[in-house]
Amino acid sequence: MEQAVFTVNNVWMMVATALVFIMHLGFAALESGLTRSKNTTNVLFKNTLIPGIGLLTYALVGFNLMYPGFASGTSMDFFGFSGFGLTLPEGGETNAYNAGYTYWTDFLFQGMFAATCATIVSGAVAERIKLHSFMIFSVLFVAITYPIIGSWKWGYGWLNTLGFLDFAGSTLVHSVGGWGALAGILLLGARIGKYEGKKVNPIAGHSMPLAVLGTFMLWLGWFGFNGGSVLSADPGAVSRVLVTTSLAAAAGGLAAAFTILFTTKKYDLGMVLNGILAGLVGITAGADVMGVLDAVLIGLISGVIVVFSVLAFDKLKIDDPVGALSVHLVCGIFGTLAVGIFGSKAGLNQLMIQALGVAACGAAAFGTAFLFFFVLKKTMGIRVTPEEEIEGLDHHEHGMSAYVLHNAEVSSKVEVTAHTNGAVTKEKPVAVH
Amino acid sequence: MEQAVFTVNNVWMMVATALVFIMHLGFAALESGLTRSKNTTNVLFKNTLIPGIGLLTYALVGFNLMYPGFASGTSMDFFGFSGFGLTLPEGGETNAYNAGYTYWTDFLFQGMFAATCATIVSGAVAERIKLHSFMIFSVLFVAITYPIIGSWKWGYGWLNTLGFLDFAGSTLVHSVGGWGALAGILLLGARIGKYEGKKVNPIAGHSMPLAVLGTFMLWLGWFGFNGGSVLSADPGAVSRVLVTTSLAAAAGGLAAAFTILFTTKKYDLGMVLNGILAGLVGITAGADVMGVLDAVLIGLISGVIVVFSVLAFDKLKIDDPVGALSVHLVCGIFGTLAVGIFGSKAGLNQLMIQALGVAACGAAAFGTAFLFFFVLKKTMGIRVTPEEEIEGLDHHEHGMSAYVLHNAEVSSKVEVTAHTNGAVTKEKPVAVH
Amino acid sequence: MEQAVFTVNNVWMMVATALVFIMHLGFAALESGLTRSKNTTNVLFKNTLIPGIGLLTYALVGFNLMYPGFASGTSMDFFGFSGFGLTLPEGGETNAYNAGYTYWTDFLFQGMFAATCATIVSGAVAERIKLHSFMIFSVLFVAITYPIIGSWKWGYGWLNTLGFLDFAGSTLVHSVGGWGALAGILLLGARIGKYEGKKVNPIAGHSMPLAVLGTFMLWLGWFGFNGGSVLSADPGAVSRVLVTTSLAAAAGGLAAAFTILFTTKKYDLGMVLNGILAGLVGITAGADVMGVLDAVLIGLISGVIVVFSVLAFDKLKIDDPVGALSVHLVCGIFGTLAVGIFGSKAGLNQLMIQALGVAACGAAAFGTAFLFFFVLKKTMGIRVTPEEEIEGLDHHEHGMSAYVLHNAEVSSKVEVTAHTNGAVTKEKPVAVH
């Protein structure tokens, strides 16, 4: 390996790391945009702290849990730990460590990944979870659940040895995060007012520009999420991954747009955003082994799935404010199975192995997440009081509003009915604080 | 070509691709920021779907229309098509395809470009166009107009053979998009209330933060738009392009700020944003052949032009909500001609060739766009009903508001009509602090 | 130096340049988010023009003041100037100029840095400074103060010869900008209503989503600010810098979150943002010489410092709307001193040199900035009228509102007191749909 190729590989991996970092802004914008303005500070607070929590936790234990040094190709290990903290290994700054990146790049790229897992949970439990309980959950989930499951495949553990394929983490990141979200939702319950008997009351997000910004940032970030998962700058491999990734996103958005149009007769922007993300999650497991048509098909199917999934979860009264379950869990599972159905690795045997991986990772992720949330619920509680929920978490937990729009030109259809003791002729200015 | 240089070339081109992608977020933010909040979801919807439409259309036909394999240097061809869909050619993943990038990178970079053309139209026709008509137009424009015109120069067609210069698309992308926008505006007419007799009623955008975010994203994206148009990572060529591009943007913003200040005595933020974009569009045709002073001059002139152009279009009652015509059409033409006036290729002969290219591309772009919009107008219609326009497209087409600000601290000057005891009294404005 | 390594070095430096550029969007979003909506257009206007002013000024004089050609290692020079404007030197486009980048990349990277210095001042003096006075100050500060002080270290002047260490500018950029901010605040005075006797009235920012967006953009930009300051793509050096930078940001955010939680019992999002930025500023001087634990400690200390600093400045009635003094000045000084306390260069002698550098740069920055603002105050004035300040700078200087939210669904806690026929009746809340 010559120095120049090593240097360019490492540059690409650093760029990919920066792109994955920007996904945290994407999640912050998407999740706050799709929830109510009375909880915006709270949502932003969680998403702003998560990268920090993720990186520090991953530095302390996660990285060494995920890459414990299992024997590549023969290990059937479930668990390993190579010690606390980061220590620069011999050759860690040169291509003696890896031909694609230095030790530092390796840690930072993987650390940025780790934090995304907790972020997926964040949106699903938004608008009713206690902040400190969620923070403790995040630490545990990033420190324990994510890296141990990750070690099974990316750390050369038993699933890798069995031939399980998950290129950039449809299962290891997205469905694992999705299972954590499901556990949280089941133990928290729905937001007040969302379900009344059989009726579903949609709770609109407060800012579509924020949601769109978030989605574009996530798509951009996926250039690094999938493109960096090649683990080098190999021109053919990386550029092919970027093409399959982008085509799946494009197809997912369009499929969701038409699916919901035929269902509700409305051009539903939120569903288009979900469709784009669904396509991205769906292609993630096999972005390296799909052809152009495969990628488009996976995107289309993901875009259809996500719409019906959102509707189905509401029928089941599983209240997911941002559609995280449909995008990350359902399409994460589909994308993982799709590696056995489409592309160069398709085959019944591969499909069975994919299903095994989905089930094993799902059981571990849901089980541990349920345990964490359950213990938290029984000890410090995980749900805010009804008063707090109705008034908004921003006021109670943060003592502030996310928006203070004074002297902006604001208007809406205003109807004032003044009840006064008799006939009213002339009103004085009405003060609206 | 050694492997390391090929790899770094391809890395730069992938980075440039990601940067051009981010321009779609830039357009989404700019266009929604400069239009009214009652149409925000609609604007965002268009801009969110366009990258997807662009990529899929370009994969299906556009790429092979734009690069049909004309003979470089001798072809006088107007049209060619090398087949539907993407197929990895021999050597497509190695430097046997191209020394600067793989086949996949080539497609994705060009595909991201293609979609920007439709986005330029989007802002100009905003707040009154029917969504499905616009979507059909976008498909046709990206599938047919953009790639065929592009083939004349970048596909080694007749304009290239004649010596027409358009480095990164002042004409091929920006003025082509601008001509499409003009065709749309002429067939749509102005927004209700914009012009009353000789009076121009300015319709303010709803969010300057969004517009500023969009402009910064576009400037950032231009690092890839122009920097990637070198088609390799050649250090001298690319870095020079980034310098000329940034200096033109800087000069454009300042020139527009002072021009409008002297005209209206106000520091007009919208005009500064237009000035920055004008400088960027202006330098695009010649970013590779301009010196430092040339770039500053082109930026300054573009920044002055854009202000007077915006005022002139309003005098002509050509209603362009976001100034797309002034930025992309007018400055796109100026920038193309500037290659014959400034920099190392200046000369009367070159100027004539530039003018020929502007005219030919303009005729083709305006003609086809007018045809598409005309047929759509006569069949399914292109304009929403007055009721829909007044109430806002978000409600009618999308069934939602882009903003739902509950429990935010909001105040403004409100006019209230109080219905009291059967008697309706018109009240004076209510001060809302 | 082979061509491939030179090319990849230059690619990384161009990417870093784009990332530093994006910091200007970060500052624009952060500063407008943390100030009031009646001044948003004004804040955005300043931040939108600053990159342009910075680049053009730096091209004209700054670059040649900062790198005047002092003799590396032996110079004790305070001042030098190598002429107006940019002229491509011999070998400027090849590795004969520098092994890490071309002349163009060098200029653009340094120019993007220069503008950040003025931006730091912008937030601190917001909501009361006259726009044109600030613009003139910016030109002077970027043209004179920043590059001359910068030449002392990065231009191989006397501080460099003495052994002063400031890797990416905790002092040369951040504390220099902070001193400029302090000078401005002292001459401007506090905003109306901020301090009443001993009481501090918090003035809330208007949009937390904007502030969070800005902070993420700044963190992202720091990948280039610190990562690019290696001045090549050296894999070990750059990736290590990215790790120390990110860990310090993570630790800073968490430390500030807990510090303010223990102080006020609230989860204060603004403080978390300040903490992240504090960690980033703190690590900047020594990002290349710190270990993992050093970086975390510097981040933690910075995150604690910033909280108490914000509280202290308010006690001193030094009104800094966005916390720029605490983040950039105080943590900039701490970070510079930290190079003598933590990491591989720690030592009493080094600490003394660091303190000397802090004092010398501080005296020069504060002195010149005070002079500029003082002369402006005595001539054209630096503060808007009280009427203008109360009504908002957007209306007076720009003739517009930053937000015009019509037909959005808006509501807030409404209290109506209707004065009817002499009798005041307490009304029930008015529903604003």
Image: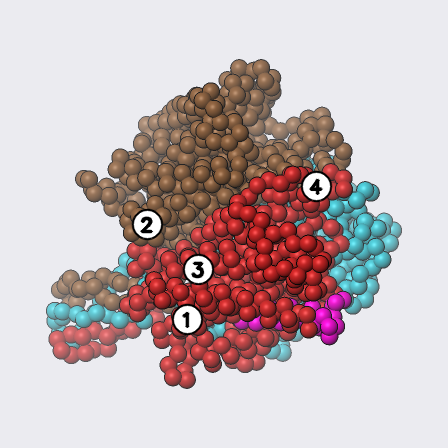
Chain colours: A cyan, B brown, C red
Q: Earlier in the sequence, mark 1 or mark 3?
A: 3
Q: Which residues are magenta?
A: C326-351
Q: Nearer the viewer, mark 4 or mark 2?
A: 4
Which is more toward the observer, B131 or A353? B131
Q: Earlier in the sequence, mark 4 or mark 1?
A: 4
Q: Are marks 4 and 1 on the same chain?
A: yes
Numbered badge on residue C137: 3
In the image: residue C30, left or right of residue C404: right
Residue at the image position 54 percent from the left and 71 percent from the top: C326
Separation of marks 3 and 2 at Cα, in angstroms = 19 Å
Q: Earlier in the sequence, mark 3 or mark 4?
A: 4
Q: Position of residue A46 (x, y in %)?
A: 56, 66
The amino acid type, in three-letter code, at marker 3 is Phe
The quadrant holding residue C301 is bottom right
How many C-alpha atoms fall within 10 Å of the one at disc 3: few (<14), some, or many (≥20)?
many
| Tags 4 and 2 touching, CB below 8 Å | no
The amino acid type, in three-letter code, at marker 1 is Leu
Q: Are marks 4 and 2 on the same chain?
A: no
Which residue position is annotated with label 2?
Answer: B261
Residue at the image position 51 percent from the left and 57 percent from the top: C144
Q: Main secondary structure of the magenta part?
A: helix
Separation of marks 1 and 3 at Cα, in angstroms = 13 Å
Helix or strand or loop: what does disc 1 sit on?
A: helix
Which residue position is annotated with label 4?
Answer: C95
The amino acid type, in three-letter code, at marker 4 is Asn
Separation of marks 3 and 4 at Cα, in angstroms = 37 Å
C189 up-or-down from A367: above or below: below
